[in-house]
Image (cartoon, rainbow, N blue to C red):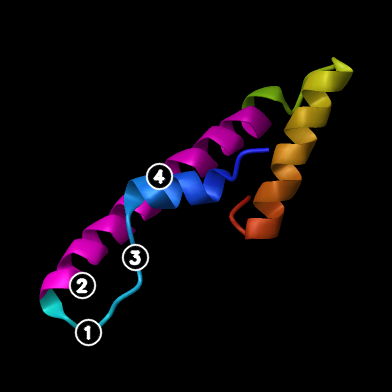
Amino acid sequence: MMDYKLIVMKLIGKIDPVGDTNIDNERMENLKNLCQLVNELVGEIAEVEYINKASYEHSVKAMANYAGKFLDKLGIKE
């Protein structure tokens, strides 16, 4: 299985601050990009849950439930 986190972090770049303004300015942009990506990905998961939670089809309902439980764990579900 691919290591998705490794791939994403390679694309985004380092995000840990080092105390050097020039380096940290670049890493702040990387952090902002990572946060934006995570927000969009969570939105995709939330959409799966929202659109499909009332489905009568077993596989669709199972995916909606899985997405909902994930959102609950993050503490961001209403």
At label 2, counting other C-alpha atoms closer than 10 Å, the crowd grade (few under 14, some 14-19, many 20 or more) is some
Mark found first going from the N terminus, 4 or 1: 1
Q: Do the residues labelled 2 and 4 touch (CB within 8 Å)?
A: no
Q: Amino acid under label 4?
A: Leu
Label 3 vs 2, first from the N-terminus: 3
Q: Which of marks 4 and 1 is in front?
A: 1
Q: Residue at x 22, y 58 (%)?
A: 29
Tell me the element at label 1: loop
Label pair 4/1, CB-CB below 8 angstroms: no
Q: Which mark is residue 19?
A: 1
Circle 3 residue? 15
- Mark 4 crowdedness (10 Å alpha carbons): few <14, some 14-19, many ≥20: some
Q: Does the magenta stretch include residue 45?
A: yes
Q: Distance between the residues labelled 2 and 4?
A: 19 Å
Q: Is residue 51 magenta?
A: no
Looking at the image, residue 70 sits to the left or right of residue 26; the answer is right
The kind of residue on which mark 1 rests is: Gly
**Magenta-tinted stretch:** 22-50
Give, as a three-letter code, the residue at label 3.
Ile
SS at badge 4 = helix
Q: What residue would you read off at disc 2?
A: 24
Query: Is 14 drawn above or below residue 67 in the view shown?
Result: below
Quarter of the image for the N terminus: give it: top right
Residue type, label 2: Asp
- The CA span between labels 3 and 4 is 14 Å
Residues tagged 2 and 1 counted as in contact (Cβ below 8 A): yes
Q: Is any part of residue 58 visible from this angle?
A: yes
Mark 4 highlights which residue? 37
Q: What element carries label 3?
A: loop
Query: How far separated are the C-alphas under marks 4 and 1?
Result: 25 Å
Residue 73 numbered mark, or none: none
